Amino acid sequence: MDSSKARDAVLLLDKEKGKTSFSAIEEVRRLFGARKAGHSGTLDKAATGLLVVCTGSMTRLTRYFLEGDKRYTGVIRLGVTTDTCDAEGEITATASLAGMDEGRIRAIESRFTGRLRQAPPIYSALKIKGRRAADLAREGRDVDLAERDIIVHELSILDADLGSGTITVDVLCSKGTYIRSLARDIGEFLGTGAHLAGLRRTASGGFSVEDAATIGEMRNFVSGLPAEKPFLLAPEQALADFGRIVVADGVVKKVSNGAFFGRGDILSLEGRSPFIIMDGRKNCIAIANVDTDNWSVEYSNVFNR
């Protein structure tokens, strides 16, 4: 796939530390000359790892990736609590780690797995009456964010260094989980306080950071070098779990305008709803829920080329 295809595609970006998600996707947009770009799940400025970026007409696909589970590697520092729940904030409390042992730390694997209630950090992008909670907190206002239901499918300790007071964890969790809040709650459970010292997103939905490219690698690709990672995806690749319907050339315009098509208009059908509707050259022209028993078509996206 040549670089011009990236103007209307799904791209896997390995975001570097120190950049906001917004500035990162804007850099991608400008690099490939895309009209617009969106992403499916923000990463904090200090975090690194996978951002699923949709460009051009494919920004309509963003919503399909928002619901997916996320996987992170996080470094939690015990004994130091901050107001932002991460290393960027002001220290609000410290505590001794005397008496802490690996057995107590291992208890977090079961305690923080399953369905949990979690309060988001007050320094977050969540809105309160139209204003970001973080902005209100910086103004010294009281910020009250309701707890939310989350699911931690897996939490595994990769390393526990009692000398430095850090725990490295691998977490697979549902959409909306704040790893900063998880670090805070782990510190409270252990009685030491804690904050998130480092974070890397390693997977989102069915995508892996191993397939993602850094902005430098994307620049090399634009300059004509072969892609080092399979970071550039056509819609049918990104939506691999969707069914496939290929329609005859004579009804492509009809589908592109969101009009009904019948069984006799299709060349092939595989999988189940929702379906990617494609022309004979396998270009994605629409996404629709199709009742194959009663044959009804309900479009969710139409890519009018």
Image: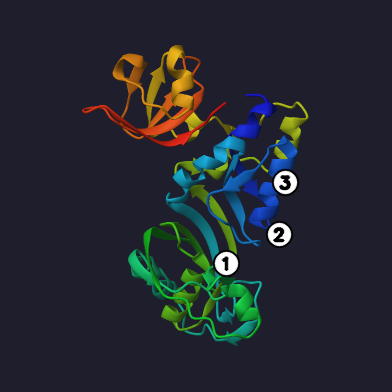
Q: Nearer the viewer, residue 118 or 247?
A: 247
Q: Measured from the top left, where is residue 171 in percent x and y?
A: 45, 58
- State the separation of the CA atoms marked 2 and 3: 14 Å
Residue at point 58% right, 87% down?
Answer: 93
Q: Quadrant of residue 87?
A: bottom right
Q: Would residue 163 appear left or right of 18 to someone viewing this image?
A: left
Which residue sits furthest right?
223
Residue at point 68% right, 37% down?
Answer: 34
Q: Measured from the top left, where is residue 7 in percent x and y?
A: 65, 33
Residue at point 75% right, 33% down?
Answer: 220
User: Is there a contact, CB below 8 Å, between mark 2 and mark 3?
Assistant: no
Quadrant (top left/top right/bottom left/bottom right) for the N terminus: top right
Q: Is residue 121 above or below residue 24?
A: below
Crowd class of label 3 (few under 14; some 14 to 19; many from 20; radius 10 Å): some
Q: Measured from the top left, where is residue 260 in percent x and y?
A: 36, 26
- State the separation of the CA atoms marked 1 and 2: 17 Å
Residue at point 43% right, 17% down?
Answer: 251
Residue at the disc numbered 2: 18
Q: Earlier in the sequence, mark 1 or mark 2?
A: 2
Q: Measured from the top left, where is residue 195 in percent x and y?
A: 56, 74
Badge 3 element: helix
Residue at the disc numbered 3: 27
Amino acid at circle 2? Gly
- State the separation of the CA atoms marked 1 and 3: 21 Å
Q: Nearer the viewer, residue 284 or 39?
A: 284
Q: Is residue 160 visible?
A: no
